[in-house]
C-alpha cells in the first residue's frame, strides 16, 4: 500500500475511534507503543479539527446576511488560530 493513499471513513467512526483512544491509559505500555499511540491519536485529532474548520468555513460561504457572514468569519478565524497552534 502506498503511503500517499487516502481512505474515507464515516465521521461517526472517526469520532468513536478518537473517543476510544482518549479512554485508554497506555502509561504502562512500552515507550515505542506510547509514541505510536501519540502519533496516531494526534493525527486523528488534527483531522477532526480540520473537518470542523472546514464546516465553520462553509458557514461563511452560506451566510444569508452580512452580519451572519461577519460572525461566521470571526468564529472561523478563532478556530483556525487554535488549529494552527497545535
Image (tube, rainbow, N blue to C red):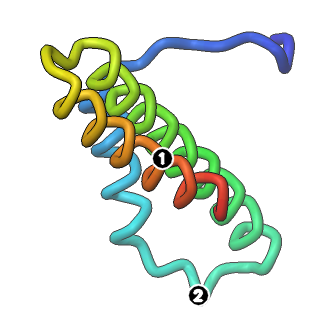
61, 53: nearer the viewer: 61
| Callout 2 crowding tier (Cα within 10 Å): few <14, some 14–19, many ≥20 | few
Quadrant of the snapshot with the C terminus: bottom right
- In percent of the image, x 15 and y 20: which residue is there? 65
**In whole angstroms, how far apart are the C-alphas of marks 1 and 2?**
35 Å
Q: Is residue 23 above or below residue 20?
A: below
Mark positioned earlier in the residue sequence (1 or 2)? 2
Which of discs 1 and 2 lies nearer the camera? The answer is 1
Residue 2 falls in which quadrant of the image?
top right
Mark 2, secondary structure of its residue: loop
- In percent of the image, x 22 and y 24: which residue is there? 66
Mark 1, secondary structure of its residue: helix
- In percent of the image, x 30 and y 36: which residue is there? 70
40, 52: nearer the viewer: 52
State left or right for residue 8 relative to residue 36: left
Residue 84 falls in which quadrant of the image?
bottom right
Q: Which residue is mark 1?
A: 77
State left or right for residue 43 relative to residue 68: right
Amino acid at each position: 500500500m502506498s503511503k500517499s493513499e487516502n481512505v474515507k471513513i464515516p465521521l461517526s467512526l472517526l469520532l468513536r475511534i478518537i473517543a476510544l483512544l482518549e479512554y485508554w491509559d497506555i502509561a504502562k505500555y512500552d515507550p515505542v507503543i506510547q509514541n505510536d499511540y501519540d502519533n496516531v491519536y494526534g493525527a486523528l485529532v488534527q483531522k477532526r479539527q480540520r473537518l470542523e474548520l472546514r464546516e465553520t468555513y462553509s458557514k461563511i460561504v452560506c451566510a444569508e446576511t452580512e452580519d451572519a457572514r461577519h460572525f461566521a468569519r470571526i468564529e472561523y478565524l478563532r478556530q483556525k488560530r487554535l488549529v494552527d497552534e497545535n
